[in-house]
Amino acid sequence: MDRLGVLDSEFLNIEDGIAHLHIAGISVFEGPTPPAGGVERLIGSKLDRIPRYRQRVRSVPLELGRPVWVDDPHFDLSYHVRRTALPSPGGDAELCTLMGRVMSQALDRNRPLWEAWVVENLADGRWAMISKVHHCMVDGIAGVDLLTVLLDAERDVELPTPPHWEPAREPSGPAMVLDAWWGLAGDLLADARRLPLAVRRPGHALRQMGDVGVGTVRFLRHLTSTPPLEIEGRIGPDRVYAHSEVSFADVRIIRDAFGGTVNDVVLAAVTRGFRALLLAGGEDPGGAVLRTLVPVSLRDADARGVPDNRVSALLLELPVALTDPVERLQAVHARMHELKRSHMAEAGRIVSDLGDLAPPMVVGTVTRLATRLIHRLPQHSINTVATNVPGPQFPLYCLGRRMLAYYPFVPISHGVRIGTAILSYDGHLAFGVTGDFDAGPDVDLLATAIADGIVELRDLALRNDHASA
């Protein structure tokens, strides 16, 4: 049986009807809109390469094991592929309103956990597809891999004929329990096989244990409560959404001029956006501590295309108090460099590995209790999330129509009213900002201010080049 990993299971446990744990994106295509049934035929032709799209999650009785993936005997592709249209004028405002509404609805746990919305009537003869997948199925990197499977790298591609599919019989409750405990025994055996290596290389093993200990301590130290801000707090079930876009070439110009990484430049722009958001809300950025969760991929090359979650996280305090754009970038670079050396990500990997050995009934119960507690006592340790995923730097096509842009979506959870997803595609870098509808954070302001931060740094970089020429 195919069991969910501990992190995959946690994304199910955290979801409670208010925090929706699906990730998503808007793909905007050149026209014309495919005829009725066209996208269904496309996805149907690829289903043999995406087995999760025909599987649903089933719980093991009494949580004696982690949930398993089973074939849906009543799978109906037409349920998952839906069609809608924007009201005139079909611009970004109407598209973002639709995105917020689609993201406000939880996925049906009794069916495969995905939806694809074909959106007609975009301005300039364009159309869009909203792809929505539960986080228990994929992380950001796996989500991009999924996109490249569904779409094509060439304009004229003949749809393959998928092999005949028959759903496998769903295992019984006792069989799932037995498989779970056999799986646990296998995990313990695999860990036991690592012991001889530790005995042969005790110094290496001790250094690893020390690094993990240091990383855990530093992670916990960064979880201290921050002074309350208006942009954090309780959330409701409904979402708002906005996006912006910049040239990826501009990001490289900034990196080459001032140093750091592409991710440093992106996070500096996000910092600029939050500084603008705080000022617009009448708060003083000089006294604010704004901490963002930065997911870090643990996926190696051999795991590309595997539908699961392989991530850890860093906790970065955004330097919103700094007024100078270059100083903000340098501060972000220095802090990220320190965090990468802190072994936080390695500690997260070890915690996830140990979670695989913990009784699921304990892990699930603790997570659900913690979620209910946060309802009453909102957390002030993490204020936002900023996830950056590299996308394909070549055009993709859907039924011969070129994808012009891709705008990512990141879910938010209790205490985090606003989050930013960043994804690069074909020479562009897109920012997708998710907000809580009830709290009313200005997602449009943040999305625009982040893009302005890139332009601001690019202009300074070009001015610096001219001055040194």
Image (spheres, rainbow, N blue to C red):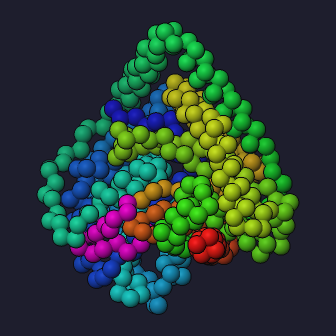
- Name the residue rendered at 69%, 64% in the picture: 326
Quarter holding residue 364: top right
Residue stretch rendered in magenta on the structure:
392-414
Relative vertical location of residue 459 with respect to residue 423 in this rendering, above or below: below
Point out residue 356 in the picture as x, y percentages from the top left corner. Answer: 50, 29
Answer yes or no: is residue 330 visible: yes
Q: Is residue 22 left or right of residue 128?
A: right
Name the residue nearer the viewer: 144 or 330: 330
- Name the residue rendered at 29%, 47% in the picture: 51
Query: Given the current orientation, which residue lies at the most extreme front position?
Result: 469
Q: Total number of numbered labels?
A: 0
Q: Is residue 421 left or right of residue 145?
A: right
Point out residue 132 in the picture as x, y percentages from the top left corner. Answer: 43, 61
Point out residue 283 in the picture as x, y percentages from the top left corner. Answer: 83, 68
Q: In the rendered image, which quarter contains the C terminus?
A: bottom right
Is 73 magenta? The answer is no
Q: In the rendered image, which quarter contains the N terminus?
A: top left
Query: Given the current orientation, which residue lies at the most extreme bottom position?
Result: 89
- Name the residue rendered at 19%, 45% in the picture: 166
Relative vertical location of residue 193 with respect to residue 256 in this rendering, above or below: above
